Amino acid sequence: MAKKAEAAAPAPALIGTSGDSLREAFGKALAACANDFPKLVVLDADIAGGTGAHHFRKAFPGSFLQFGIAEQNMMAAAGGLSAVGYLPVVTTFAVFCLRAIEQARLSIAYAGRNVKIVASHPGIDVGPDGGSAQALEDLAAFRAIPGMTVISPADPAEMALATRAMLEFEGPVYMRTGRSPAKRIFGKDHTFEIGKGRIIRDGKDVTLIACGVEVGRALEAAAILADEDISARVVNMATIKPIDEALIATCARETGAIVTAEDHNIYGGLGGAVAEALARAWPCPVEFVGLKDTFGASGEPEELAEHFAISAPFIAEAAKRAISRKAHA
Amino acid sequence: MAKKAEAAAPAPALIGTSGDSLREAFGKALAACANDFPKLVVLDADIAGGTGAHHFRKAFPGSFLQFGIAEQNMMAAAGGLSAVGYLPVVTTFAVFCLRAIEQARLSIAYAGRNVKIVASHPGIDVGPDGGSAQALEDLAAFRAIPGMTVISPADPAEMALATRAMLEFEGPVYMRTGRSPAKRIFGKDHTFEIGKGRIIRDGKDVTLIACGVEVGRALEAAAILADEDISARVVNMATIKPIDEALIATCARETGAIVTAEDHNIYGGLGGAVAEALARAWPCPVEFVGLKDTFGASGEPEELAEHFAISAPFIAEAAKRAISRKAHA
Amino acid sequence: MNMKPAKAEIQTEGAQRVQPLNISSPSLIEDIAAAARFVRRHVIASIYHAGSGHPGGALSCADILACLYGAELNLWPDSIHDPHRDRFVLSKGHAAPALYAVAAHYGFCDAKDALNLRKLNSPYQGHPHVKDLPWAETSTGSLGQGFSVALGMAMGLKLQHSTARVYALLGDGEMQEGEVWEAAMCAAHHKLDNLCVLVDYNKMQSDDRNENIMGLEPLAAKLRAFNWAVAEIDGHDIKAILSGLHRAAATFEKPAALICHTVKGKGVPYMENLPQWHGSVKLTRQQAEDALAALDATLWEIKELLDGQKS
Amino acid sequence: MNMKPAKAEIQTEGAQRVQPLNISSPSLIEDIAAAARFVRRHVIASIYHAGSGHPGGALSCADILACLYGAELNLWPDSIHDPHRDRFVLSKGHAAPALYAVAAHYGFCDAKDALNLRKLNSPYQGHPHVKDLPWAETSTGSLGQGFSVALGMAMGLKLQHSTARVYALLGDGEMQEGEVWEAAMCAAHHKLDNLCVLVDYNKMQSDDRNENIMGLEPLAAKLRAFNWAVAEIDGHDIKAILSGLHRAAATFEKPAALICHTVKGKGVPYMENLPQWHGSVKLTRQQAEDALAALDATLWEIKELLDGQKS
Ligand SMILES: Cc1ncc(C[n+]2csc(CCOP(=O)(O)OP(=O)(O)O)c2C)c(N)n1
Ligand SMILES: Cc1ncc(C[n+]2csc(CCOP(=O)(O)OP(=O)(O)O)c2C)c(N)n1
Ligand SMILES: [Mg+2]
Ligand SMILES: [Mg+2]
C-alpha cells in the first residue's frame, strides 16, 4: 500500500467531548472523586471516548482496565475484580450493557458483587447513530434482576452527586447517563439520595414523574400547563429501583393523576415501576410518555423527542388526559 | 488413557423426557405441526434434550440446525435464516435467551424478522438446577423489546395450541415453556388466541390473573378461597404482550381487586404489564405474587413454590389482602 | 447509475453462477477505482452534511466495497428481491456511509438522496437498517452480529441448494467480540463454503490501535485454527481484492476469510492512520473541502457535493 | 479431613509461593488418587440422593480437581478468606458435585452434609453459588462466565502484586461460547501468567460428541493462536497433571492452558463415553450400587454412602 505523505492533521471535533452531557458529567465526577475510593477500577470496552470514562483514564491510567470490544467478558470479569477486593465500574453504551446482561445477572448480581454498571447512550437521546444504538429496554431489563439498583440522574449536577452516591452504595447498581448536551436543572445546593424521588416543582392537579433527560422536559411541560392554569407537580424520580413508593402514593393522593415520562419503551421501565407502586399503594390513572413500543431512528435528540412524542408538549397533553380521567377513576 | 471394557449400559432415566412438562408438550406439538410449515427450521444450542426440541430433531433431522453452546450466534443467525425465507424457531433455556437478548433485539426485532424464540426452564419451576438457571427476568426483558410478542401458556394442551398459533403469527415471538411435570388444566375444546386473556373460572370478589405454571396454582387458590366463601375469578393471561387490556379493565370493574401470579420477579413481568394496563384503563388495587426481587434456589418445584411464596395458599392470601384494600381505593 | 460490465440473468432454480469477469481487465479495474473514489467523496460529503459519523473506517473499506459491488456480487438493483441473489452484510455497521455511497454508485439508491445521512425521516440512518433500505440485507451497528446473520443466510441458502454466496465485512476491532468466534467455529463446522468474510484490517479501532487496545495477532493463524481458508491481501489493491474474492469463491467445504490490510482514513491524508478520525466526528467546511481536494475532486464537484443539497 | 502434605503459611504482603511439592513422590500420588476415588464415589452418592445431576462431566474431572486441591492450590480451609490465596473457579458449573466432593475431602465442608445436593435449604445447589459456599469463589452454571470471572481475579491480583494464582476448569463444549474466546484474547493481551485454564477434554457435551455438535479441533492450535502457552496431557494421569500444573505455573507473560484428555463418566464403566450420562439424570439404587462397586467401594462403604444420610 502506498502510504500517503503526512499531512498536517487538523484536530477533529469529537462529538463526545463537546457540551455538558450526562456522560461527560459522569466521567468528570468519576475522576474527581476517585481519590476517595482507592479500590476503584474502571473497565472499558474500547469506547471510553463515548462514555466519559476518558476523563478517568487520563487522571488514573493505572486503574483503567481495557477489555477491547468484548462486553460479556468485561462484565463477568468485573465480578472477578470485585471478588479480589476492587470496586469495579463497568462502562459502555446502554445497548451493549444489554448484550452482557446475563453476565451482570450471574457473575455480579447473583454472586453478590459490589459492581457499578454505567451505561451511556440510552434512549433516543443517542440521536444520529440511529435506532440500532438507542436502548429502549435497559431500565426494564436491569430492573428485573434481583437486587439490582437502577438509577437515572437528570442533569450534570445530579450526575456528579449520583456518581459518588453510587460508589458509596454497597451492591450492584445500573446507572444511565446520556449522550446529548444536557439541560442544567439543579443548583449547587442540590442533594441526591439513592431510593428517593424529589418534588422539584409543586402543583396540585397532576404529578409528572420523570427520570433522566425527561425531567427537564417535564419541567417545561409544567410551565406550558401553568399557562393554561393547570398546576402540575414535577417529581424527579432519579432512582427507578427501589422506587420511592411512599412519594408516589402521596402524589397520587394529593394530585389524583399521574404522568410518567422516560426516554425508554413505555413498557417495564419507569412507567412500569410507577404503575406497580400505585397498584400496591394508591391506584390512580396514569398516562405513560415514552417510546410506544417502537424503535428509534436517526435524527437530532430534540427533533426525535418531538417525532416520538416525548417532548414537553406531549407530556403536557398527557397531563390533560390524565386529569380528565380523574372523574372516571 | 486405559479405556474400560464396555459394560452393559442400563438406560438412564432422562429427567427431560419423563412426564408431561410444557417443554415436552412444545416439542411434540412442534414435530406434530411441522408439516404445515415447510419453511420451519429449529435451532438448538446443544440442549435439545432439555428444551423438547429433540422430538422435532427425531422427526425432521434435516430441518434441525445445531449451533453448539453459542447462543448469541444462534440468535442472530436466526435473523439471517429468516431473511432467506425460513421460519426459524430458536430453542434454549430462558436464562440463555437472556444471554442473547441484544441479538434478539437487533437482528430479529429491529430487523423485522419473523423468528420465534422458545425458552424452556423459566422461573423456579426449573427446580434442582438452582438459582443460576432460574430465569426471573425474561418476561420483563423481552417485553421491553419493541414489537416483541410474549406468551406463556399454562398447560400441555394450551402449549400445543400456542405452538401452532405462534408459527402462524407474523412477527417475533418469545414463548416460555416449563421444565416440571405440568398440571393438566384444559380439555380438548380449549382454544388459544395470541393477545387474548381468558376467564377460566368466574367469580366476583377478586380476579386472579396468572400465566404459565401459576395458572394451575391460581385455580387451586380459587378453590381455597371458595371454602372461605370468597368468590375468585381466574384469568389465564397466556399473552403477556400485547396484554389484554380490555379484559383486565373489565375484571377490575367487575371484581374491584386484582392479584397477579407469575413464576418471575414481581417487577416488570406479568404483574408489571397488568399494573400498566390498569393504570391506563381502570385503576384498582393489585397484589403481586412472584419472586420478591430475590433469586431462586435448588429444590423441587413444588417446595420452591412454597418456599418463595408463589404456591396456591399465598395466592389466596394475596387475594384477601387485595379484597381488603378495595374500601381504601 | 453505473453497471457492472457482465450483468447476466440470475436463474432462480438450480442457478448457475454468472461467469466470472476477466479480473485483470484494465477497464474493469479503472471502473472500480472510479467507484471507490466516488465512495470516498460521498462519505466525506454525507458525514459533513450529517454533522457526525465515522469517516476513518468508511474510507478504509471503500476499495473493498467497490470490488464487491462492481464485480463480485451477483446483485443488481432489479434483483434485490431475487431469492438467489448474493448477499452482502456490512457487519461493521458504523461504516454505513460507505455502503450508502457504493449502493448509490451502482444504482441501488439515489446519490443525492443518500447524502441525507443520519437525518430524521431519511432512510440513511447512522447504521444500516434493512426495514428502511431492503438492499442493506440486515440491520447492523452492534459489532459481531452481522457476521452471525450472514452465517444464517449462508446456512439457509445451502439448505436451498442455492448457488448464491454471502459476504460479510468485519472490522478488526470487531474481531474481539466473542460472537465472531462463535460464528467462525460454526461456519467451519457446517462447511459453509458459500460464506466469505472480509476483514478490514486497518489496525485501528475506536480509541487507539488494536495492539494497544486488545492485540489481534496472529489473526490469520487464529482463523486458520478455526478451520477457515485464509488469504491476506492489500485491501487497497483492486486487482488483489478481485483475485482474492475469486479464490475465496473456489474454496471447497471451507468458509473463506480475506484479511484485507488497509489504512484507516485512506485517501484523506490528514485522517490516515489517526485513531481520532474513527468517529463520531463533525467535519468543518474546511476539513470537508480539504478532504475532497485530496480525493481529486474538482472545485465544481466539491461545490456540488457540499452545497448541492441546498438547491 | 485430609491435608496437603506441605502446608505452609501464606504470606500476605510480597508473598512467596509455597515451595513446590515433590510431585513424583509415590505417597503424594497415592494420596491424590485416593482423593479422586473419594470424589467419584461422593459424586455418585450425592447425585443418587439428589435424584438429578450431571455425573459424566463430574467424573471426568475428578483427577484434575484432586490434583488441584491436593497439591497445587495454596488454599486451605483456614485460608479461604486470605486475600493472597490461590483461586479455583469451576467454570463448568454443572460439575458442582465433584467440587463439593473434593472440598469435602480436603476439609472445606462436611462430607455427609455435602451429600445434600440440590436440596432446598442446602448450600449445595445444582451449580456452585458463592453466597452459599464462600470457597466456591464465584457462582457458575452459565458456561463461559467462570473463565471471565477468573480472568478478572487474575487481573486484580496482578494489580496487587500478589503471587496468588488463579485456576479455572472449563468443559470442552464450553469452549464453543464466544465469551471464552473474548477471555482468551484478553488474558493473553494482559499477559496474565498467573492464570491457568484447564480444559476437561472429554470429547462430549450435552447431547453428543463435540465433533457431532460443533467441532473444536484443532483445539491446541486455537489456544496457541490466541497466544496461550498450551500443553496436552492425560487428564487421568495424576503425575502428568501435576507436572502440567508445575510447568503452567512457570510460564512468563503468558497465560497457560492445560488440555486434559479425559473420559466422560470415567470410573463407572456403564457411563464411560456415553453422552446420555451427561445429565441431568436420575440414578436408580441399582445404578448407584453398580457405580460404587465399580469404584471399588466395599459393601459397607456403599451402604454408608447411600443410606448413611437417613441415620
Ligand atoms: C458490540 C459493540 N460494541 C461497541 C461498539 C462501539 N463501536 C463502534 S465502532 C467501534 C470500533 C470498531 O473498530 P473496527 O471494528 O476496527 O472498525 P473500523 O476500524 O473499521 O472502523 C466501536 C467500539 C459497537 N458498535 N458494537
Ligand atoms: C451458556 C450455557 N448454555 C447452555 C448450558 C447448558 N449446558 C449445561 S452443561 C452443557 C454441556 C457442557 O459440555 P461440556 O462443557 O463439554 O461439559 P462436560 O462434558 O465436562 O460435562 C450444556 C449445553 C449452560 N449451562 N450454559
Ligand atoms: Mg479497525
Ligand atoms: Mg465435555
Image (cartoon, coloured by chain):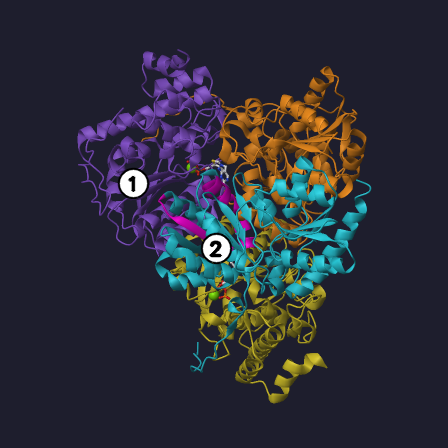
Chain colours: A cyan, B orange, C yellow, D purple
Is the CB–ligand 2 distance for label 1 below 8 Å?
no
Going by the image, does B159 lie left or right of D270? right
Q: CA distance from mark 2 to mark 1?
A: 28 Å
Q: Give, as a three-letter code, the residue at label 1.
A: Asp
Going by the image, does D170 lie left or right of B134? left
SS for callout 2: strand
State the extent of the magenta-drawn residues as a range. A84-109
Is the CB–ligand 1 distance for label 2 below 8 Å?
no
Going by the image, does D29 lie left or right of C70? left
Where D246 sits versus D133, above or below? below
**Chain holding disc 1:** D
Q: Position of residue C166 (x, y in %)?
A: 58, 59
Where B256 sits versus C251, above or below? above
Q: Position of residue B60 (x, y in %)?
A: 63, 37
> Which is more foreground, mark 2 or mark 1?
2
SS for callout 1: loop
- Residue A91 is tagged as 2
* Res. C2 in view: yes
Where A225 sits versus B128, above or below? below
Viewer-side residue, A261 vs A308: A261
Viewer-side residue, C250 vs A55: A55
Q: Which residue is mark 1?
A: D86
**Which quadrant does the N terminus of chain B fall into?**
top left
Is C295 covered by the magenta stretch? Answer: no
